Image (tube, grey):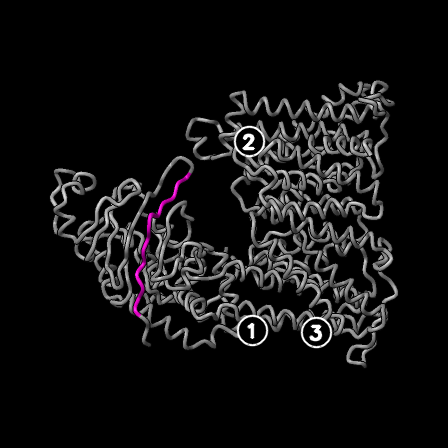
Amino acid sequence: MTRAATPSLRTQGLGVRFGAFAAVTDVNLTLEPGARQALIGPNGAGKTTLINLLTGVLRPTSGTIHFGDRDITPLSCDRRARIGLARTFQINTLFPSLTPLSSIVLAICERDGLASTWWRPLRRLTRVYDEAHALLGRLKLDALADTPVAALAYGKQRLLEIALAMAARPRILLLDEPAAGVPEDESGELFEVISELPQDISILFIEHDMDLVFRFSRRISVLVAGSVLTEGTPRDIAADARVREVYLGSSGAVHA
Amino acid sequence: MAIVLFDGVAYGMLLFLIGVGLSITMGLMNFVNLAHGAFAMVGGYAASLAMQHAGLGFFAALAVAFVAAAAIGAVLEFAFFRHLYRSHPLDQVLLSIGVVFVAISVATYFFGPSMRAFTLPPSLEGRVNLLGLEVGRYRLFLVASGLAVLAALLLVLNKTRYGAMVRAAVDNQRVAAGTGIHVQRLFFLTFSFGCGLAGLGGALSLGLLGLEPSFALKYLIYFLIVVCVGGAGTISGPFLAALLVGIVDVAGKYYLPGAGAFLVYAVMVAMLLVRPNGIVPRKGLA
Amino acid sequence: MKTLTIPRARLPWFEALFWLALACSSLLMPDKLTLLSQILIFGLFAVSLDMALGYAGILTVGHAAFFGMGAYAAGLLAKHGWAEPFSGLLLALFVCALLGYLLSYLVVRGADLTRLMITIGVCVLLAELANRLSGITGGTDGLQGIEMWPVFGRFDFDLWGRTAFFYSFGVVLAMFQLVRRVLHSPFGLALRGIHDSRKRMLAIGSPVEARLRLAYCFSAAMAGVAGALLAQTTQFVGIESIGFNRSAEILIILVLGGAGRLYGGIVGAIVYMLVHDVFADMNPQFWMFWLGIFLIAAVMLGRGGIMGMLSRLVVTKGPQ
């Protein structure tokens, strides 16, 4: 299936305040088509808030967001998801009473506009089930397809988070600490999966593990106290003294 | 016309007195308490008993009503309600329906289904001339009481330490607990106080609405309207809403007798459409 | 506690047995046919509430608004000249679906409390309306003089209630199968998703509010059909069909049986109405008292109802 080139995701002057507290201020961020961009910064810098702004969970108090030529700032959360913006949550936000298989089936149904049909039995949608199995297989979850989500191991739940986002066939993928809480030997596998994602998807990921950041990103944005401190290639960022001071600690060595 | 307005205000004050406790409970503890009318009923019966069997005067009976309702509220809070603060609203609804059913059936058993006899105390009988208007003394007393309670509550909430704790807990319960506020005790006291106020209101309604066991459910909808339309968790919101409901109801019944209570419900639905969070949306108490 | 394991493939047999037993009850208790019909009708009403409450998560103590509307719609249609039974059902279905659809815009948005208020408010408002328009509805005397035409043109509504029973049985069974179909459809899956995590549903592009509105609309339509059935089989519509007490009662029935489970409403209705019948001579105050005690105990001791209890004792195993 041929698709039009992924548009870029662009913010201009994006900001949100809660009363007197400015969580995000004047962020100009561009996610190019096919990007592999990391968003790093100390705790409380506003990274998740930024993702929430991009996906529509939060309304900005200033600035705009453009998806290609289109101003998506007034669009609701589910509208943005339908035009191709998918995300994962920092804390697993899954469907505890469903199974991985039915979760993915649900996501595909919503994507294809099938979720409002109330007269047709689910099991007739063989095409959907096939696609769901294929996706689960790619993420090595196929063996657990019928296990209740609540019973899955944490690392597998993280993978399911990504699978849910992938099921929507997004054009932009926003990953909020995909490896959070995942033991080190499993996080590599997680990022292998991410690196195998189609090249035409633009990915922005928040991550704290610097090894993973430098290994998988082609571009890094550094967010501090709600604004972008600097942006650049991994090499630039590793060499930047300000970043080292603010985030890595002035005595920290960096592996680039 | 002015009389109708005044009567409406008096009725509204009564609704406010009973409903304000519910507003605080719902706003503070996020607890849907459909049994609130039962506490008003308890107060009414306590006052009635105090006057008829213990020979107490009306004003003393009001105090008895407050204490009785607060006491029962305290017991129920300790036994049942406090375990459900974090529960699903369905559980809270079901429990409170259970409590109100028990209350109504017990009241019917002990007091019979008919309306409770009540004689106005001599000091509140008759009319008095207020600004050229001949108003009923009892209704004037209701208005005065309502205003007094409003003033007292606003004072307590805005000027005392207890009030500050309540406002903090309404805003953010977890953080309030983190600052050392004993939230459970706060809930306990506030809930009991709210019930006491309801009991007071119930006793006062002896002379205006009449007391019977079905009181608890019959007027429940009005208390809920007052709280929802006014804004749960605030004091002035329910005050305004109560006035609105009182006036609309009395005026409606006077000018459009065929419409009955229909007008109030219609106004309620309209208000909730326009302001789903209440006249005074919750941003801290008062 | 020992659990009993049932292979999932066998479940349909148990269900068929259940419905067969219900049908046969008409033969075992021929003098209680009215009660049995009402059990079925209230079972359907409870299942409709479950669609709103258990599956769409809309807390409502005002569902009798639709039950009553359906009853009055069907009753009035019959009284004013067209007493064909299925037409009455269809009218009730459409009227309540429309009412439910309009109300859903109010009910689906807003916090729990506002929503609860609106559902109670609308119910009480309609009850008051029914009271006021006593010229049309019969007010507190109820709507009388309904004479239904025979079902399929052949089966008269007899005095013993036999036709009424089988008519109700057929309609309720059909509606039940429809509910089951809906729950096993993509829409049903979406409802379960919303129930689990609204946030996640929004993130995968689900127009959550639209889904909930549709669920509420269904729920209203079904409650309307139940009301219509009652009107047609008892040939009477009482004003209590539409008030707060009826809404509270059906909520209790559903919770008794177990919300969020396909058979919860029906099981709840069976137990509640049988128990109510046994104690029919009891003083209504006693009934209310014990009902209140039961509610308090049920909440304090944990939810799930009868079906919840069953699900802990009986485990199903095998492919879905």
The residue singled out by tag 1 in the image is A119
The image position of residue C29, as x and y in percent, is: 77, 67
3D distance between C-alphas at marks 1 and 2: 49 Å
Residue type at tag 1:
Trp
Tag in front: 3 or 2: 2
The image position of residue A12, as x and y in percent, is: 33, 51
Q: Residue at 71%, 37% (x, y): give it.
A: B244
The image position of residue C119, as x and y in percent, is: 65, 51
Which is nearer the eye, C160 or A105? A105
Q: Are marks 1 and 2 on the same chain?
A: no
Position of A65 with respect to C275 (left or right) is left
3D distance between C-alphas at marks 3 and 2: 55 Å
Q: Are marks 3 and 2 on the same chain?
A: no
Residue type at tag 2:
Leu
Residue B99 visible to an observer of this rendering: no
Residue B285, which numbered label? 2
Q: Which residues are magenta?
A: A5-18
Residue C138 visible to an observer of this rendering: yes
Does the segment drawn in magenta span residue C120? no
* Badge 1: chain ID: A
The image position of residue C255, as x and y in percent, is: 62, 53
Question: Crowding near pointer 1: few (<14 within 10 Å), some, many (20+)?
Answer: some
Question: Crowding near pointer 2: few (<14 within 10 Å), some, many (20+)?
Answer: many
The residue singled out by tag 3 in the image is C170
Say which quarter of the image contains residue A80: bottom left
Position of the N terminus of chain A by quadrant: bottom left
